[in-house]
């Protein structure tokens, strides 16, 4: 019964208000902030709705259409930036996915949503060749603390520890230590690169030490 709908700057305000409220990865701080994510032609947002709840998104994903794989979240969400022309677009960057309804927290629509959106974008944009995520590692800082690794100003050390954290499972089931890595790798992604200083927001530093 799920219905995939595009969310853009012309979407009714009551739904846009919910997008602001439910955004769980990169906080939307103003209407200008939201407009920068929804209005330009190189930015997309898609949500699943249920016919019985037409004004309540169940889950939504934000996508940046770019000419290269970005190395920081600021490249994607800053308000004043250059718009990527359609002829130059070759990469779809899934940079935020948010569940909206607490009562459905045990049901994962994320995999289904991303694959539907990827298929839709591939049909609409002829030059699209790469599908990537730019994702935080929200348990990385806690993992470092548990390992008593406090000196994270050394970038070589930080990168080494991030690679260990993301590739060397300490779980009995052998799945990734990090829940976001577990989600994406479980859906068929590969770990291509670890970016240092990629999210310098307070949340990004506190949870991920700035890595994405």
Image (cartoon, grey):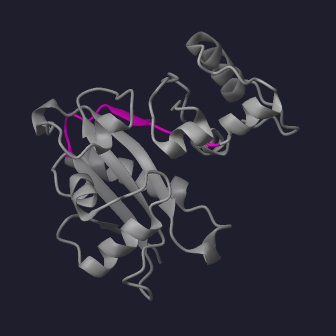
Magenta stretch: dominant SS?
loop
Q: Is residue 144 positioned above or below 154 on the image?
A: below
Q: In the image, is residue 4 part of the stretch drawn in magenta?
A: no
What residue appears at the point 20 percent right and 34 percent down from the top-left corner?
89
Given the current orientation, which residue lies at the most extreme bottom position? 52
What residue appears at the point 55 percent right and 37 percent down from the top-left corner?
205
**Left or right, 127 with reference to 57:** left
What residue appears at the point 51 percent right and 70 percent down from the top-left corner?
100
Q: Is residue 102 positioned above or below 110 on the image?
A: below
**Left or right, 179 with reference to 33:** right
Q: In the image, is residue 137 part of the stretch drawn in magenta?
A: yes
Whether residue 167 is visible to the viewer of this picture, yes or no, is yes
Q: Which residues are magenta?
A: 125-138
Q: Where residue 106 appears, x then y in whole percent? A: 68, 67
Which quadrant of the figure has residue 80? top left
Residue in the foreground of this view, choosing between 180 and 77: 77
Given the current orientation, which residue lies at the most extreme top position? 156
Q: Where residue 139 appears, x then y in whole percent? A: 68, 41
What residue appears at the point 52 percent right and 40 percent down from the top-left corner?
204
Which quadrant of the figure has residue 8? bottom left
- Counting labels gives 0
**Left or right, 132 with reference to 155:** left
């Amino acid at each position: 019964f799920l219905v995939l709908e595009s969310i853009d700057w012309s979407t009714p305000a009551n739904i846009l208000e919910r997008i602001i409220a439910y955004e769980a990865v990169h906080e939307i701080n103003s209407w200008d902030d939201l407009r920068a994510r929804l209005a330009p032609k190189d930015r997309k947002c898609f949500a699943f709705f249920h016919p019985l709840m037409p004004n309540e998104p169940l889950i939504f994903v934000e996508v940046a259409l770019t000419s290269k794989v970005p190395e920081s979240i600021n490249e994607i969400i800053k308000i004043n930036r250059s718009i990527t022309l359609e002829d130059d677009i070759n990469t779809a960057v899934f940079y935020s996915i948010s569940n909206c309804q607490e009562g459905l927290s045990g049901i994962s629509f994320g995999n289904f949503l991303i694959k539907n959106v990827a298929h839709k974008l591939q049909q609409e944009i002829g030059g699209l060749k790469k599908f990537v995520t730019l994702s935080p590692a929200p348990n990385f800082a806690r993992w470092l603390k548990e390992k008593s690794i406090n000196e994270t100003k050394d970038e070589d050390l930080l990168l080494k520890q991030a690679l260990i954290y993301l590739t060397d499972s300490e779980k009995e089931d052998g799945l990734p230590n990090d829940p976001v890595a577990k989600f994406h790798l479980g859906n068929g992604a590969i770990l291509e690169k670890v970016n240092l200083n990629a999210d310098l927001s307070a949340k990004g530093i506190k949870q991920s030490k700035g890595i994405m």
